[in-house]
Amino acid sequence: MYNMNSLKSKNWVDTHFHVFNASVAIEGARYVPQYSAVLSDWMRQAQNVGVTRGVWVQPSFLGNDNSLMLDALKAHPDMLRGIAVVRPDVSLEEFNTLHEVGVRGIRLNLAGVSHDIPAWAQAHILWDAMQSRGWHLEVHTDQGKLPHVLSQLPSDLPLVVDHMAKPLRASADDPTLRALNARAMVSPVYVKLSGAYRLGEVDPGRLAALLLSELGPSALLWGSDWPCTNHEQFADFEKLIAQANEWIISEHIEQIMSRNPLQLYWDYFSSR
């Protein structure tokens, strides 16, 4: 296990954090924050534990107004990448603008809403644009719903799944694990080791070990989920890093915490 004092020099990446302002949300949002999550606070806390880069994930309650994120990406082009929320019929002009400032994927956050997504199933222009730019699709579902969602989406897009994929059981026979394995046979799949408090009765340590054995270290990422909306008591970076250190054996730490995200979001180590 790593000594916590040694973590401050690591070039690690937090692949899942949110920033927002108090009381700002789209009309009809299921959640309206009563506090602000400020980028400078994330930067300070992350850097204290050796996290030097981050992936800003657009929260669902801001809808497709990505302006706060885009301003930050412009201000910190080396440190930050973004995952946007867009409409299925987003224009190519808007898509290209997102790419130019550092967005590298779109997020479908279906937690708490219908998992039937006919409009997205028909978003062929968007899927083609994502393929051409090397983007990926990030998906967040309710527990056990990932197989149904994947059945409606193109199988050739790189996929990132939030919060340990939220299976019903930490078992290789669980339909979610089977769906991930099947998907990984035809296109790149990544699962974020994040949001353990969103797993219900599923043991996160056991699930992390299962994901590692089933998908391999090249398919895993780590995210803080800061500021852990609705679970703010867990928004402690030292404890989150210590938890990741318990889940990931030392020989895979650098790959999962650094090399995988640098390749996926910053295109490091690429021959292109």
Image (spheres, rainbow, N blue to C red):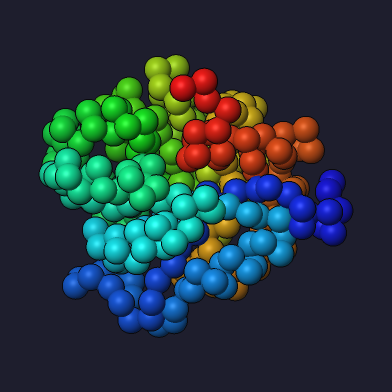
Vertical side of 236 occupied by 187: above or below: above
Vertical side of 102 occupied by 197: above or below: below
Give the residue at x 63% y 54%. Answer: 52
Q: Left or right: 91 with respect to 52?
A: left
Question: Who is closer to the viewer here, 233 or 52?
Answer: 52
Tally of numbered discs? 0
Give the residue at x 24% y 58%. Answer: 64
Q: Left or right: 62 with respect to 18?
A: left
The quarter of the displayed image where residue 185 is located? top left
Vertical side of 265 occupied by 269: above or below: above
Question: Who is closer to the viewer here, 89 or 122?
Answer: 89
Vertical side of 240 occupied by 81: above or below: above
Question: Who is closer to the viewer here, 241 or 66?
Answer: 66
The quarter of the displayed image where residue 250 is located? top right
Asked whether residue 192 appears in the rendered view, the answer is: yes
Residue 254, image x, y percentages:
71, 38
Q: Left or right: 86 with respect to 238?
A: left
Residue 145, image x, y percentages:
36, 42
